[in-house]
Image: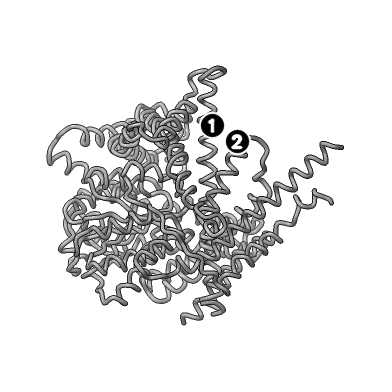
């Protein structure tokens, strides 16, 4: 059974990779199969592992009838599909957006403030001096309300720009490695698990 | 020589070359040593410094796309944690359909090998919708946050481990998060690690590697495993080579090939430009 | 009512969360936040079919109107229905359900994502050209990092991994922190605009 699974896996990988030659029917089939299966499993998973325990154990079992209110608010989102009453779905969205914005403003400073405090440290080494200058120059670069046409302001902004290029360059280097390792994962399934050509 | 041609090689030929170059070391491994970085060492050490029997919260917040990079980290973590008789409580907030299964498979494999029992030494609480809300609930009430069930829908009261773990605030000693973006370190810091002053460590796809360095510097993240390379380093530290190390030779060849492509593209570009300039 | 009610609800919800966090209401405040979190979880749980309904309407429309490539829409719909039924009957951890999902959907998913690996190579060849100073800095930084992170880098240029670590820890880390500080201020401003009702694009009526 395991070997059969590996063979199926390898065929699926090759179907997806056929896109590298050009877009074709095999790839389109695989793509739509994936989307359909993901939605199908998502529905089943939510019903079995989340909704059923919530209704059976949470609302009915523990008698938490107050949870019917958020349940109704959640269901309002389906008014998107009722012509003439689409605006009702915005009630549900409003609760989500308000919750998100409130949460962000209430809780995010806990992670944001240490980033500011940590940018001001003892300038007792070349690394620390470079670090401090780069942070300040990038913040300066992103201030668009001040004109930086000439002089020190422009030069300092340029340092920020070059520092950003270093950061983006290292991000590209890291991303290359990340994506290549994804190819390795697929090759291992084909060559090692299915064909047993490598150890 | 017609330098224009060097700029216009059929891209499919390059795809075949990269595939071959990465496959060759799988047949004939080079066995290049992998130097362990300071960031990976920190991850290992922060877990090693925990008292025996501590509870580690492990969240495998990944989809199947980045899973090949992150799965080996989970195996290595389970190995190190179980050696110290630490307990593992798992969640997976990125994808309801993939994360919980991967988390279960990779910890279960190590647990069976080391004689650890599900529900006693480790548990998988799986995916819950809306990570921020769930995390905030779990800070004070893990049972409530998990909806009273584990990843398979079984009630939590039948698992001895869950009698011990009631809240992250009082019962969890370390957070180990593997992530591919959102939910990620931002959420874990914001709602759990910073308010509770809990140590947060883990790994992520290398796509995030450069973007989390400032969290390590500020001490908000205790070390970091960067992608497959980070997993390979961690496997070395726990002294159990696995999938991470196995892929390192192919990784090296892949990088060299990309650099050669980069060089070819630029040589073609400069030669064609200087030729056009002369004309 | 249609326009004002959602905006009022946004403000009330956000202010409630912030008030409970910032003002010391003792155990009541903590309990209120937890209750709000549970309510939000429940709203999401009951809204879970939104994506599925959208998906079904889109693809059903394609099939019923026999649009070009409708056959793929039919495949997606059949796959959805079958997977849902099999998973519900067999259980999310049932042998058949897991087999199908792990060996088909997961594999296609990760293989499609791995296509990015090939595109990175093609980007290196086609687009990464040394056209000016900025591109040069970007290129040098990327090449150093690529060499530093693969074990072969140290074999060719001993000590390059240390240089790579330095780039990551100092200029890169400082650069990312600068971006983070700038983006953070932007995100706070955006959140305040949403709460004040100045940002209304989500209602479909524009700012």
- Residue depicted at x 59% and y 59%: C63
Tell me if A152 is positioned left or right of B3 in this view. Answer: left
- Residue depicted at x 33% and y 47%: B221
Against B121, residue A74 (above or below) is above
Q: Crowdedness of circle 1 by 10 Å Cα count: few (<14), some, many (20+)?
A: many
Q: Nearer the viewer, residue A53 or C70?
A: A53
Q: Residue furthest left?
A: C27
- Residue depicted at x 56% and y 17%: A150
Tell me if B173 is positioned left or right of C178 in this view. Answer: left
Q: According to the image, label 1 marks what residue?
A: A161
Q: Residue C83: x and y, percent?
A: 46, 68
Helix, strand or loop at mark 2: helix
Against C78, residue A94 (above or below) is above
Marks 1/2 same chain: no
Tell me if B276 is positioned left or right of C12 in this view. Answer: right
Q: Crowdedness of circle 2 by 10 Å Cα count: few (<14), some, many (20+)?
A: some
Report how far apart the C-alphas of labels 1 and 2 lie in the structure: 8 Å
Q: Nearer the viewer, residue C41 or A66?
A: C41
For mark 2, name the chain: C
Q: Nearer the viewer, residue B257 or B89?
A: B257
Q: Quadrant of residue A12?
A: bottom right
Quadrant where the N terminus of chain C lies? top left
Q: Residue A171: x and y, percent?
A: 51, 46
For mark 1, name the chain: A
Residue A33 visible: no
Q: Residue B250: x and y, percent?
A: 55, 65
- Label for residue C134? 2
Q: Residue A52: x and y, percent?
A: 29, 62
- Residue depicted at x 51% and y 69%: B31
Q: Are marks 1 and 2 in contact (CB under 8 Å)?
A: yes
Against B77, residue C1 (above or below) is above
């Amino acid at each position: 059974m395991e070997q059969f699974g590996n063979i199926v896996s390898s065929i699926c990988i090759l179907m997806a990779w056929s896109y590298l030659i050009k877009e074709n029917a095999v790839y389109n089939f695989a793509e739509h199969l994936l989307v359909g299966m993901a939605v199908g499993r998502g529905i089943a998973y939510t019903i079995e592992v989340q909704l059923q325990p919530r209704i059976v154990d949470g609302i009915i079992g523990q008698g938490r009838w107050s949870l019917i209110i958020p349940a109704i608010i959640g269901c309002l989102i389906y008014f998107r599909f009722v012509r003439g009453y689409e605006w009702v779905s915005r009630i549900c969205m409003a609760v989500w957006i308000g919750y998100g914005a409130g949460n962000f403003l209430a809780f995010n400073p806990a992670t944001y403030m240490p980033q500011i405090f940590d940018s001001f440290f003892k300038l007792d080494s070349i690394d620390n001096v470079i670090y401090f200058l780069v942070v300040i120059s990038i913040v300066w670069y992103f201030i668009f309300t001040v004109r930086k046409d000439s002089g020190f302001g422009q030069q300092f902004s340029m340092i920020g720009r070059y520092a950003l290029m270093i950061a983006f360059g290292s991000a590209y280097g890291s991303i290359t490695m990340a994506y290549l390792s994804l190819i390795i994962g697929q090759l291992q399934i084909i060559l090692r698990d299915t064909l047993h050509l490598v150890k | 020589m017609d330098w224009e041609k060097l700029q216009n090689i059929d891209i499919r030929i390059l795809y075949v070359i990269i595939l071959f170059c990465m496959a060759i070391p799988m047949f004939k491994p080079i066995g290049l040593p992998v130097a362990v970085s300071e960031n990976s060492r920190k991850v290992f050490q922060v877990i090693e410094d925990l008292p025996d029997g501590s509870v580690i919260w492990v969240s495998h917040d990944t989809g199947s796309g980045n899973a090949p990079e992150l799965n080996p980290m989970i195996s290595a973590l389970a190995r190190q944690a179980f050696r110290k008789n630490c307990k593992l409580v798992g969640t997976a907030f990125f994808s309801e359909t993939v994360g919980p299964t991967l988390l279960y498979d990779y910890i279960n494999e190590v647990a069976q090998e080391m004689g650890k029992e599900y529900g006693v030494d480790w548990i998988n609480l799986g995916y819950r919708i809306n990570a921020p809300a769930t995390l905030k609930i779990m800070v004070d009430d893990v049972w409530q946050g998990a909806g009273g069930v584990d990843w398979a829908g079984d009630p939590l009261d039948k698992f001895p481990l869950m009698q011990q773990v009631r809240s992250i605030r009082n019962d969890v000693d370390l957070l180990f998060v593997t992530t591919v973006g959102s939910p990620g370190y931002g959420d874990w810091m914001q709602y759990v690690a910073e308010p509770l002053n809990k140590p947060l460590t883990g790994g992520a796809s290398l796509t995030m590697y450069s973007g989390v360095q400032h969290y390590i510097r500020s001490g908000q993240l205790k070390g970091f495993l960067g992608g497959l390379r980070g997993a390979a380093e961690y496997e070395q530290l726990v002294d159990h080579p696995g999938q991470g190390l196995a892929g390192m030779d192919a990784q090296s060849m892949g990088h060299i090939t990309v650099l050669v492509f980069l060089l070819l593209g630029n040589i073609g570009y400069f030669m064609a430009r200087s030729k056009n300039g002369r004309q | 009512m249609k326009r004002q009610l959602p905006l009022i609800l946004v403000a009330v919800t956000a202010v409630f969360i912030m008030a409970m966090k910032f003002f010391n209401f003792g155990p009541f405040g903590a309990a209120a936040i937890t209750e709000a979190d549970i309510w939000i979880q429940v709203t999401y749980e009951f809204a879970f079919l939104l994506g599925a309904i959208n998906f079904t309407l889109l693809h059903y429309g394609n099939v019923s109107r026999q649009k070009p490539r409708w056959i793929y829409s039919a495949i997606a719909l059949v796959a959805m229905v079958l997977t849902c039924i099999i998973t519900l009957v067999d259980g999310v951890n049932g042998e058949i359900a897991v087999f199908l999902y792990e060996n088909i959907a997961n594999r296609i998913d990760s293989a499609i994502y791995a296509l990015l690996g090939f595109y990175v190579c093609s980007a290196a060849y086609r687009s990464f050209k040394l056209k000016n100073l900025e591109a040069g800095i970007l290129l040098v930084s990327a090449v150093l990092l690529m060499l530093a992170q693969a074990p072969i880098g140290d074999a060719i240029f001993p000590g390059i991994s240390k240089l790579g670590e330095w780039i990551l820890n100092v200029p890169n880390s400082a650069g990312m922190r600068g971006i983070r500080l700038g983006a953070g201020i932007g995100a706070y401003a955006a959140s305040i605009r949403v709460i004040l009702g100045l940002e209304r694009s989500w209602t479909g009526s524009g700012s």
